[in-house]
Image (tube, grey):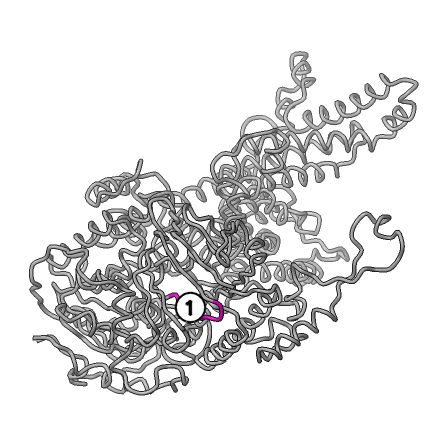
Amino acid sequence: MELELRGITKRFGSLVANDHIDLRVAPGEIRGLLGENGAGKTTLMNVLYGLVQPDEGEILVDGRPVTIHSPRDAIKNRIGMVHQHFMLVPVFTVAENVALGMEPTRRLSVPGLRRAAGFPTDLLDRGRARRQVRELSERYGLQVNADAMVEDLPVGVQQRVEIIKALLRDASVLILDEPTAVLTPSETEDLFRVMRELRAGGRSIVFISHKLKEMQAIADEVTVIRRGQVVGERPPTTSDAELATLMVGRPVVLRVHKEPAQPGDVVLSVKDLTVSGEVIATDGGGGRNAVDGVSLDVRAGEILGIAGVQGNGQTELCEAIMGLRPATGMVRLDATDITHATPRDRLRAGVAYIPEDRHEDGIVADFSVADNLVLDTYDRPPIARGIAMDLPAIRKNAGNLVSEFDVRTSSIDTPVGTLSGGNQQKVILAREVGRQVRLLLASQPTRGLDVGSIEFVHRRIVEERDQGTAVVIVSSELDEIYALSDRIAVMYEGKITGFRTPDVSVTELGLLMAGAHISGPDGQDGVPEGPADAGPDDAGGDGAQE
Amino acid sequence: MTSDPGNQPAGSEQGPIDTVTRSATATSGPPLRDRFRGSGRAVISAITQGSPTVVTILAIFSALVLGALVIAFSDTTVLHAWNSFFAAPGAAISATWDSVAAAYSALFEGAIFNPHTISAAFHGGSVGAIFYPLSQTSAQATPLILTGLAVALAFRAGLFNIGAASQWIGGAIVATYLGFAVSLPLVIHAIVCLIGGFAGGAVIGWLVGALKARTGAHEVIVTIMLNYIMYQVLNLVLGTPTALQLRGQANLISPNIDPNAQLPHVGGPPPQVGVGFLVALAAAAATWWLLERSTVGFEFRTVGANPSAARTAGMSVPRTWVLAMLLAGGLAGLSGAVAIQGTFYSLNFQSFGNYGFSGITVALLGRARPLGVVLAALLFGALQAGSTVMEAATSVPVDITEVLEGLIVLFVAAPPLIRAVYRLRRTEGAGLGGAAKGWNG
């Protein structure tokens, strides 16, 4: 079956998630869909699976337009999907899960019973469901036991149960949404083997990922999406650098006016910082460390940009620096050892923190703008006297910050959850840098923001730098890294693969982001957990600072 | 000039010592966030944001209507009248009306005021008698206000305190013991007992908070288990002569507390207002101030609304849990002290009553806000005060108030039902709609 998407456009408010996307999937083809988080891959596939209705465009199956308003329609058109989060009932067996929603039944042969009961009296045909699972499992080498309880199965096998579900519904095109995100390297290998079997059986697969290596390993043709648009189609033999460039975009779309940095003394010094990896074992890393012996220095009045594909330990690095995550190694602020300090002590010592997950960690959605603006200064003068909070002081503080940071809100009593993402971020920024700070640590400071807010946030960050604050920016947007950084560090698999000046080429950064400077296995073979002190030796040395 | 990590000398005192594990200090690692997710937050937000006052009033009204049906159709006279409905339909309807009207007016007279006392006052009767029902209502409401506050305070910090009963026992035991075992001057003795009661409850509450903070044990499980444990502890101390049991008694009952420790009634001729009621109102005011105007309350509310943001902002979530449970336990313990010192004067299973569990419903009805708790407790107190009068006057059993209480909570907990019945339009994201959205989070 041949599948074609023509001019698919989907807008969420002012955000254009998909902008006239064309995509063709030939029979027996594995089509890679490459793009960063938020590029619009998942939205596109949700359109295809009927979970989201497109604003424009059409879907053609074998050249004939079809309408897909629900997953049911998609299944009818022989399109199957395996979601990032599995839709399985943990306490059911594999066969029961597979049967769910299309239960094979046997008619109970008692004449007149159905009419008398007033509802269908068919019996669930467990035997048939089990036979079907066994049959498919054998045909495609899926190695799934039909009678196993789903909760007892490893993630990789659960994923294959999802694949069986789709196959049983006779899917001819299978959409795998970031299937490797939850797999260990060896499970990924198994998945690729299954995918090849399926392709050999004539089925097509749309494989979604942001990992270059996987695209090169399994796709027949790679479609690259950036900011909702198709920016290119490439064969899998295309180089890392070219794919990375396509995926993250060329730099300098957004230039921030800034003077050359005037670096002063070292403010933040991180040495051998290691965060154990169990918490991100889902990220294909097995037991490796989330942050693996990272060392870096940041000086007053300079911006260090930490680049890297998402999920390479940047989040954990920031949280470890803030004391929100257990870590080994050493963190110093202005030569004071804060390795063992609580998050509160670090904030007090002059660290401003803009967390990556703004909604979860940065604001209290139900609280007013005014309350959110004192979330980490609520117990100190002038906001509090003793344990009494000074309401007029809170209002005055809010009034000042709202006007200084141009927060668009109807009043300072409005719940912050009702503001736009950009204004929520301004509230966080205002709170964090509205006081005297030595270090600003900002993780994905402009993710999901509109252009106006991005500009504002960037300008304020540069202003902070000019006032002598040391700034660390973590971003997976290369544009942002280039626009802000005075120095760039690249993270890959928990390590820093290199320090560069901002005049480094995109190609070189792309290579560093793909782990090019790390020798040895690329993660597919299951990297054994390295000793914590291996980090700086691998990572350092190639810094280019004059 | 700027150092490269690789070239940095491994100098000064760091070195191999660098790799000191911080896990000891970081009691709350990443799994913390997972613990916060899920239904709890949505339920808390549904309760505190809650339904508009209109819905609450309609819920009470609906409960009274349904309660009326229960009253009418458990009355044999009414049932007989309905048996001959086709012969005399008017009689059936009027019998129903009479039955309900008699019950509810007796309830009202027992809880708010009795018109007869006014006319009696004009003819030489007691003026104080007019206020007797209100005095009864306030007395019944007093322990409920305090246990309601105990549940509400914990709610606001994101904790489900199902253990007001166990904390009540903790407070009552300490207050009773101090009440009869020590001898102190007037006023001081009563205050010492109140403080002791607060402390007794606070210890039980602290235990819950500490277990949650240290081990992650869910407070619902712990408080429910502690309810059983404290019930048995009460059993034990009341049965042990060297502890609380009244000498020479086989029954489970403590001695009466010293008159100096008893809370007096004040305000003109009897009946008067119990000092315990004033203590409860003061506690409600203090709880309001703590929650809405103090840094401690700001922490409670932040942790309750978004624990990960609280943690990121430098608050200690486990410490907040411990403190919130400690104060909540203290309030429930105070309820125990006030009940013993102001009403019963002796601890036994009758005085234990049902305050702990009613506190949960009071807090629900009061939307976990101090003023709401006071109003809800007064409503429940009125139902209880009125029900005894009602039973005496109409033979409708006092248990009907429990039916009413249950119905009120049912309707308050289900705003969509009330909206559907009264065809109200939805206002903003209040009620369970908001909660339903949160289940996915």
Return the x and y of residue A176 as percentages of the image width and height: 47, 67
Chain letter for mark 1? A
Return the x and y of residue A323 as percentages of the image width and height: 32, 68
| Nearer the observer, A391 or A202 | A202
In this rendering, is residue B334 above or below A316? above
Q: Is residue A148 magenta?
A: no
Which image quadrant is residue B138 in? top right
Q: Is residue A438 left or right of residue B125?
A: left
| Nearer the observer, A237 or A417 | A237
Magenta residue span: A27-33
Total numbered labels placed on residues in the image: 1
Q: Is residue A140 left or right of residue A281?
A: right
Return the x and y of residue A445 as percentages of the image width and height: 27, 57
The residue at 18%/75% (across/down) is A499
Q: Is residue B322 left or right of residue A300?
A: right
Name the residue tied to disc 1.
A31
Local crowd size for mark 1, using a 10 Å CA cut-off: few (<14), some (14–19), many (≥20): many
Viewer can see residue A498:
yes
In this rendering, is residue A19 above or below A393? below
Amino acid at circle 1: Arg
Secondary structure beneath disc 1? strand
